[in-house]
Amino acid sequence: MILITGANGQIGIDLADALVERLGEGEVLVTDLRSPESLRPGRKYDVLDVTYMESVEKIVGSYKIDTIYHLAGILSATGQRHPELAWNVNVNGVRNVLEAARKYNCRVFWPSSIAVFGPTTPKVNTPQETVTEPGTMYGATKVTGELLCKFHADHHQMDIRSVRFPGIISYSTPPGGGTTDWAVDMFFQAVNHGSYTCFVTEETRMPMMYMPDAVQSILDIMDYENDGITVRTSYNLAAFSFSAGELAAAIRRHIPHFKCFYEPDFRQAIADSWPSSIDDSRARHDWKWQPHYSLEAMVSDMLIHVRAKIATS
Ligand code: SER
């Protein structure tokens, strides 16, 4: 059986849908700090706080888990405000999951982030192997998590796989507390109000990915034969990069009256410390990573779904 931690979060909802569709009823156990308000079909629910080792081991052992998608985590902006919480959830959570996976012989997927990079990293076409000196606590927890994954893979011969996600754009569940959240908020505000006040400047350019590609990347890397996985920290991954102004212009092609204003806050400094584009050639080579959505295709599809979601809410 498969375990997803942090399953109420942005990636968890969509990944669980994809795994339930693939594996059928009753094969996916979704867990989070609390049960969601509306339960979706085909999966089992339980409550799990990943910061408690005993709880993680109990869930993994009692449900006979063989694969863990460990998504529970605190994002960058929340992590800057609550650094101790970020360390506890992000580092102790990964450690507990890896230890339970070792005990019960599970495979593990864990998402890292472009936040492992920082002001001293080359900003354009950031290489796979480069400086990882992040300026945020979130970034520090992701670097630590990557090194823990590598240690367990090398030292205990465990099958652990990871990708460094860029900002992820989706409509099912809003992200919470991230620096790339503007790229999601802009769609909802454009449809709802025809205007948006963006918390980074018009010129701020960041690597991004549409959720269907993000989910596909998780399925693809986990499907690939173990010998082909040559990176045991975490793979760089990219789809496209755009600035806030470019996204606003792309939305304006569908909603001509849309107005975007720019009022940068503390998240600007985090955004400025991250890459503007990513070299993901290693993932493309090793496990044939290939994104499918362009910026234009993503914007069209997002607007269809955001409109439908707002119409029915
Ligand atoms: N999207 C995340 C954030 O903004 C980065 O991993 O925190």
Image (spheres, grey):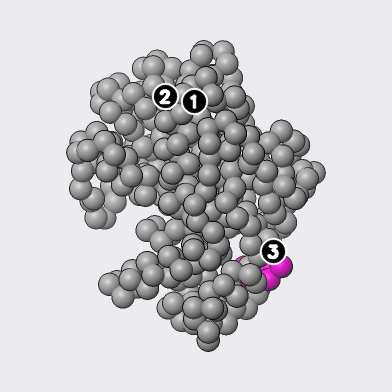
Prevailing secondary structure of the magenta residues: loop
Q: Quadrant of the N terminus?
A: top left
| Residue positioned 59% across, 78% down in the render | 260
Would you place residue 226 above or below residue 91 in this image? above
- What amino acid is found at the position of numbered circle 2 in the picture? Arg
Q: Is mark 2 within 8 Å of ligand 1?
A: no
Q: Nearer the viewer, residue 234 or 90?
A: 234
Q: Are marks 3 and 2 in contact (CB under 8 Å)?
A: no
At label 3, counting other C-alpha atoms closer than 10 Å, the crowd grade (few under 14, some 14-19, many 20 or more) is some
Give x and y (percent) for residue 248. Answer: 59, 73
The mark found on residue 204 in the picture is 3
Helix, strand or loop for disc 3: loop
Which is nearer the N-term, disc 3 or disc 2?
2
Would you place residue 22 above or below residue 192 in this image? above
Taking the view exactly as shown, the residue that stands out farthest to the bottom is: 257
| Residue positioned 57% across, 82% down in the render | 259
The mark found on residue 160 in the picture is 1
Q: Mark 2 points at which residue?
A: 107
- What amino acid is found at the position of numbered circle 3 in the picture? Thr
Q: Is residue 109 visible?
A: no
Q: How many marks?
A: 3
| Residue positioned 46% across, 28% down in the render | 224
Q: Which of 99 and 85 is in front in this view?
A: 99
Q: Do the residues labelled 1 and 2 touch (CB within 8 Å)?
A: yes
Segment tinted magenta in the rendering:
198-204
Q: Quadrant of residue 141?
A: top right
Give x and y (percent) for residue 300. Answer: 46, 68
At label 2, counting other C-alpha atoms closer than 10 Å, the crowd grade (few under 14, some 14-19, many 20 or more) is some
